[in-house]
Image: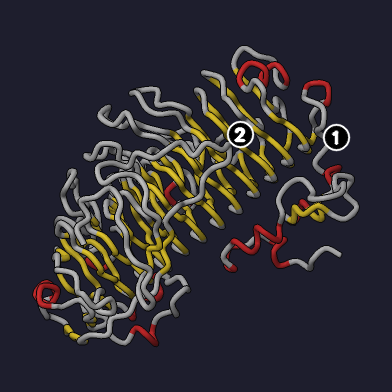
Amino acid sequence: MALGLAHFITPCIAANMLICMSVFGSAGADVLPDAGPQRAEAPRHWIDMQVISPGEVIRVSAGGDFQATLERAAPGDTIELEAGAVFQGPFVLPYKPESSDPDFQWITIRSGGNDWALPRAGVRVSPADAVAMARLETASGAVVSTAPGAHHYRFTGIEFQPAASSPQAGAGKFLNALISLGADEGAGDPLPHHLVIERCYLHGDPLVGTRRGIILNSAATVVVDSWLADFKMAGDDSQAIIGWEGPGPYLIRNNYLEAAGENLMFGGADPAIRERVPADIEIRGNHFSKPIAWKAGSPGYAGTAWTIKNLMELKNARRVQVDGNLFEYNWVESQNGFAILFTVRNQEGSAPWSVVEDVTFSNNIVRHVANGINILGRDDNHPSRQVRRIVIRNNLFTNLGEGQGEGDLIQLLDGTKNVVIEHNTAIHKGSILKGEGRPHGGFEFRDNIVLHNRYGIVGTDSAPGNAVLERYFAGAVVYGNVIAGGSAGAYPSGNHFPDSLDAVGFIDARSNDFRLSMASPYRIGGRAPGVDFAELCSALSVTEQPPACSSAPLP
């Protein structure tokens, strides 16, 4: 399968990784029709992992030549690396012609014996599982990279790191990336595709850092059940996962993602292919965090001022589903402390088609951060397309205002279109909503439970409340919200203004149980405002649920 096309078609074949796709666009570019409706469009292409490797099992012992084994392995084969052994790279995944037999497509690379020594599929590994893994490392380049068009490789139960990165060996090597899937392929060049990182442990050097864990410039790529940590850099951005050149689809599920700059980012560099926008991205059930020990003045701080920015940023992406994740610990340092950024960027000025559109941010917890979500309608440095169709729904925001931040919930800058914020519950120290720049069209703020605090809804040169809505959000729908501490005269009718947080009627706010009790005056027929905790708890990993998820159900 040649993947010089903007998108590709793979049949849905049992016992393989399924990419069930409809045909759209053209072979030359990712030009899509306007989705039209106000609501965000879901990803069109979904990845369902079902991988088998029924061919030869090739065992490589400590001291063996892993690269030579990669060269001779055939589709369908499994390469077993001796658990506990260290293999020195760099390594390149070679291109191999596709097999005509759909069952003989994949080359699996795994640690020997890991079927019983590692957590089962669907369970996230941790650093404690490294003792059962083979280790791949290098002192230069990337540990693993791809030849043009390399495809159908699956890593399971492997540790990736820079050379000599253990504390006993002293500081290791600084690497730009551990895994680099795809380079800057131009139009017509074959893209790497059908790549899986599963139950793997990727970590940078604890002393000098590593810039990136995985570069996703490939197509049809999966990162699941893995642990990515210690990606940090002083003076520049670092990421656990970043992609800017590949078309997607991507599945990023049930991972621990730790980085100083942006834990996860799409965009950040201009794609070489015109109209390329990473698309059809599923980000589900992950834990995003930064160690408090990276913050100056905190216990365990080692004295290195890593460049701290945010937990997730989309600069060029479309059709993104962010669901059931935990985002925590982000503070003011190299940025203003917003945890989540949907900020379109034509980064180097050569990609005016850059856009952030059709994003659904749902059923997530955001906590212990300086500020919540920042959305930028247009790039303020270079020409870009308008940010549009963003839905922020059924999320729980708590402890906003830690890390020297103001504790603002949402900030919209410079003319977004069709941003919908509904059924969220937020415990925050700052403003509910800030509006700046060009007006925002099609804005909705409905059925949320928030705190008014000092200013509520604010904007430059306007009195808080209705004046800001008229200037920056003309025609907005602001209805059904519970705004604790606010004044009814300053806001549109149809909203509720209890005197305090206690008057909202949470079951136990002091114990972080923010479900509305049956006695709450705001349970008025139909669905109550704020978070639907049944839906939230169902989406979250069982290890990352708030207290309400383990409490007895309401009568």
Whether residue 207 is visible, yes or no, is no
- x, y (%) of residue 25? 34, 44
**Residue visible at 65% across and 58% down in the picture:** 536
Disc 2 on helix, strand or loop? Answer: loop
Image disc number at residue 440 = none
- Mark 2, Cα crowd under 10 Å, few <14 / some 14-19 / many 20+, is many
Q: Which amino acid does label 2 sit on?
A: Asp
**Residue visible at 75% across and 66% down in the picture:** 551
Residue 156 higher or lower than 114, as above or below: above
Q: Which quadrant: the C terminus?
A: bottom right
Quick one: 369 or 551, which is closer to the camera?
551
- Mark 1, Cα crowd under 10 Å, few <14 / some 14-19 / many 20+, is some
- x, y (%) of residue 41? 51, 45
Mark earlier in primary sequence (2, 1): 2
Residue 268 higher or lower than 16, as above or below: above
Circles 2 and 1: CB distance less than 8 Å? no
Left or right: 390 as drawn, with respect to 215: right
- x, y (%) of residue 478? 72, 31
Residue 86 higher or lower than 59, as above or below: above
Left or right: 312 as drawn, with respect to 164: right
- x, y (%) of residue 20? 40, 62
Residue 535 higher or lower than 424, as above or below: below
Q: Distance between the residues labelled 2 and 1?
A: 20 Å
Most distant residue in the top direction: 461
Q: Which residue position holds label 2?
A: 408
Q: Which residue position holds label 1?
A: 499
Left or right: 16 as drawn, with respect to 348: right
**Residue visible at 24% across and 50% down in the picture:** 5
